[in-house]
Amino acid sequence: MDSIKLLHLLADDPRATITDLADILGETEENVQKEKDELEKNKIICGYHTVINWDKANIEHVDAYIGVSAKPERDAGYDKIAERIARFPEVSGLYLMSGTSEFLVSLNARTMREVADFVGSKLAPIEGVTSTVTMFVLKKYKVNGVTMDMKEEIHDDRMIISA
């Protein structure tokens, strides 16, 4: 079975049924289910997510990205700091980065005050964290390859006529 093709199919449509995946891959449903289970067990597939346009849901929701500068620990590098940050349920993503900050933390909250409280009382006091820069998402145009509330491009099918 082509595991890479299965991964691409699931990345494009995580709700695809085993029957549909088996048809596309030319495999039995049993083989596809077995491969999918194995990919999940080995943490190659780590989850399935829904892209939600919170602006249209009419719910208070704030997304923030926080650049975190940190001093690495002897014999542990940045891993111990990352483990401390990742434990917070407010943190939806955590990345070791190149550039001006060592980490990029993504955070989902109801209000900007919740983000500010998280940064001030939980994130900044972590031993090894030297500074933070918080950026609030003002508008989303594209998330995980899905365009959010953008107008479709209008195609003009008229033929070009020149004199």
Image (spheres, rainbow, N blue to C red):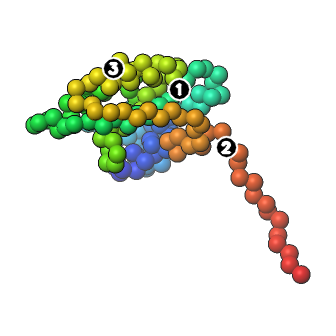
CA–CA distance between discs 3 and 1? 18 Å
Q: Is mark 1 on a helix, strand or loop?
A: strand
Residue holding disc 1 = 62
The disc, 3 or 2, on the residue closer to the chain's N-terminal end is 3
Q: Nearer the viewer, residue 24 or 120?
A: 120
Whether residue 49 is visible: no
Which amino acid does the dot numbered 3 rest on? Lys
Residue placed at 30% from the left, 37% from the top?
Answer: 69
Q: Nearer the viewer, residue 27 or 78?
A: 78
Residue 158: x %, y % from top left: 83, 65
The disc, 3 or 1, on the residue closer to the chain's N-terminal end is 1
Residue placed at 65% from the left, 22% from the top?
Answer: 58
Q: How crowded is mark 1: few (under 14 residues within 10 Å), some or many (20 or more)?
A: some
Residue holding disc 3 = 122
Give the number of the mark in front: 3 or 1: 3
Which amino acid does the dot numbered 2 rest on? Met
Whether 26 is drawn above or below 73: the answer is: below
The quarter holding residue 67 reads: top left
Residue 127: x %, y % from top left: 22, 26
Q: Which quarter of the figure is the C terminus placed in? A: bottom right
Residue holding disc 2 = 150
Which amino acid does the dot numbered 1 rest on? Val
Q: Residues within 10 Å of mark 2 (few under 14, many from 20)?
A: few
The quarter holding residue 148 reads: top right
CA–CA distance between discs 2 and 1? 20 Å
Whether residue 140 is visible: yes
In this image, 100 relative to 112: left or right? left
Residue placed at 28% from the left, 33% from the top?
Answer: 130
Give the number of the mark in front: 2 or 1: 1
